[in-house]
């Protein structure tokens, strides 16, 4: 059942991701995704940035862990949970998960011991539009969520 879950994301999250990716120029950026999930749906209510002390290059990023911890603490006090992560790829390149992305997603899933499969978003600018691709990790396998299936809804 969980592989047909609907994923609903507030539009303000896309807006925030746009601002963060624009200000990071061509360096990779990203953050955590927060909200709620159950066997039937995922609701994304907020996303974090990488934090001021994050270390990033064009193809990698290490988040500022103090910032992430504080942000997460704040979200948990609002009854939101960590759902996964998002990160950017350089403009006009593929949004496919790299081998490193795949191993990072699987490690993240194991680290947080999710009750339901976590969600990962890769974003990138293409001809002035922000594009995205979604993934979920089920049984330690990374699966692409095909946008054509209509499972991803921005509201
Ligand atoms: Zn990547």
Image (tube, rainbow, N blue to C red):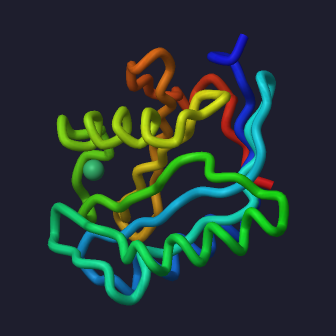
Image quadrant where one finds the N terminus: top right
| Viewer-closest of 108 and 101 | 108
Left or right, 119 with respect to 4, comes to left
Question: Exactly how many numbered labels are in the figure?
Answer: 0
Left or right, 34 with respect to 29, comes to right
Left or right, 64 with respect to 55, comes to right
**Where residue 142 sits in the image (x, y, percent)?**
39, 25
Identify the residue at image location x=66%, y=28%: 116
**Where residue 78 sits in the image (x, y, percent)?**
83, 67
Left or right, 53 with respect to 60, comes to right
Identify the residue at image location x=46%, y=36%: 109
Q: Where, by quadrant of the figure, is residue 106 drawn? A: top left
| Viewer-closest of 131 and 72 | 72
**Where residue 66 sits in the image (x, y, percent)?**
45, 79
Identify the residue at image location x=52%, y=27%: 146
- The outermost residue toward the top is 1
Rendered position, 63 above or below 155? below
Q: Where, by quadrant of the figure, is residue 59 drawn? A: bottom left
Image quadrant where one finds the C terminus: bottom right
Identify the residue at image location x=59%, y=34%: 114
**Where residue 150 sits in the image (x, y, percent)?**
68, 29
Rendered position, 134 above or below 146? below
Rendered position, 127 above or below 42? below
């Amino acid at each position: 059942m969980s592989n047909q879950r609907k994923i609903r994301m507030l539009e303000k999250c896309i807006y925030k991701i746009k601002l963060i990716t624009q200000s990071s120029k061509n360096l990779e950026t990203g953050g955590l995704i927060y909200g709620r999930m159950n066997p039937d749906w995922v609701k994304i209510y907020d996303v974090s940035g990488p934090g001021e002390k994050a270390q990033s290059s064009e193809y990698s990023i290490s988040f500022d862990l103090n910032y992430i911890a504080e942000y997460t603490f704040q979200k948990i006090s609002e009854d939101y949970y960590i759902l996964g992560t998002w990160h950017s790829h350089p403009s006009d390149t593929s949004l496919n998960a790299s081998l490193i992305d795949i191993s990072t997603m699987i490690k993240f899933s194991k680290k947080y011991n999710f009750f339901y499969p976590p969600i990962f978003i890769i974003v990138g600018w293409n001809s002035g539009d922000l594009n995205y691709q979604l993934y979920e990790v089920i049984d330690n396998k990374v699966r692409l969520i095909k946008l054509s299936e209509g499972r991803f809804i921005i509201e």
